[in-house]
Image (tube, rainbow, N blue to C red):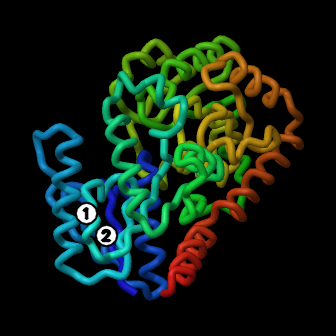
Amino acid sequence: MKILIACHGLWPISSIGGMEKQAYNLCHGLSKHGIRVTCAVPKTQLTGHEPFPTLGICWPSLKPWLLANQIFSRRVQNHIESSTYDYAISIGFALSAWRSRCVTPLIFHTAGANWYQKQSYAFEAFDPRIHWMKYISKKLISQSSTVIVESHHMEHVLQEQFQGSLKNIKVIYPGINHSKNLNHSVRKRRHALFVGRFTYEKGIDYLKSIGTALLKHNFSLSIVGKGPLLRQLSTLKGKNCTIYEPVAPDKLLNFYQSADFLIVPSRSEGIPQVLLEAMGQGAIPVVSEVGGMLDLIDNKTVFGFPTGDTQACFEWINRIDKWTDEKKHETRKALMKRAEFEFSEIRFLKNYLDLFQKLGH
């Protein structure tokens, strides 16, 4: 079987970019199972160390993102139509310019499908791409042999949008590597962590309020990432709060292992890679009740608060902090067990292999 997987970026050395990490893991995993995989990505994102064939496509420079995306997609499309593939997989909108005349079956991975979440309506004015994403997603969904979503919640959202007419939709949870050993020696007391982009939809204004409350009550906070709203977080910097540039995955594991808590205060979200990675390292997640994270929230291992309710987030952290060390340890073990059995790379790949078998390959 021969497959092309298209993605806007391929950043296995980045701490940010769950969609790109999933594309990388999928390409690597399928190629190890004897499937001939070619990954089409912007040339600027290739590292030269990808353990599978890559097709570097020029990403137009000095262009608005929407136009650059369309040009990149058309270039990948032209390659597909001049080659022979059993399937083409679009991770997000990498194949936004898909033409219905193409004979290669399309599999559309919606990634977080944030553009269909009700919370996205609130910031459409901040990001005109959401209107475009809704339009393109309808086109790609209508032309796809299979639509992949990464949570049952988003399956429900899409079925609601399409009035229950989607018959070719499949839920495949993201996959991660997990740690079998819980290292207490590196974990700090009363320490919280945020990892992600500093943007509006990631709830950076909420993070600022949560961070202020934590610091006032003698917690410490590490913030890892970058983005246009960095200035909003500048007032938090000090003795007990450090802001770090994005780091490589092996170094990011050290942040997870040293944190008591992971904070995900997003307005709109799929199942973020950082949430799964933190679970795999025993950092207790406190997350907003939105998007794909609703699949994970049980208030026993993953704790939820209403989006924007920063006081509720702080109260969860403060309450859990008062638990006995034994109860915290049991919670971390349960987290790591969930990561191992629900979100392992092995299960992630098996779901794709089962899909291809069902489709006739």
Structural crowding at the residue carrying mark 1, measured as other residues with C-alpha within 10 Å and reported as few (<14), some (14–19) or many (≥20): some
Circle number at residue 73: none
Residue that appears at 17% across and 78% down: 82
Quarter holding the N terminus is bottom left
**Residue 290 place in picture, x, y as percent:** 62, 35
Residue beneath disc 2: 39
Mark 2 lies on a secondary structure that is strand
Residue type marked 2: Cys
Q: Is residue 227 above or below residue 80?
A: above
**Considering depth in this image, is 27 or 5 the residue closer to the camera?**
5
Residue that appears at 33% across and 73% down: 4
Q: Is residue 316 above or below residue 21?
A: above
Mark 1 lies on a secondary structure that is loop
Q: Quadrant of residue 219?
A: top right
Q: Is residue 278 left or right of residue 131?
A: right
**Residue 199 place in picture, x, y as percent:** 41, 28
Residue type marked 1: Arg
**Residue 328 place in picture, x, y as percent:** 82, 41
Residue beneath disc 1: 99
Residue that appears at 53% across and 37% down: 117
Q: Is residue 256 visible?
A: no
Mark closest to the chain's N terminus, 2 or 1: 2
Q: CB under 8 Å between callouts 2 and 1?
A: no
**Residue 128 place in picture, x, y as percent:** 31, 30
Structural crowding at the residue carrying mark 2, measured as other residues with C-alpha within 10 Å and reported as few (<14), some (14–19) or many (≥20): many
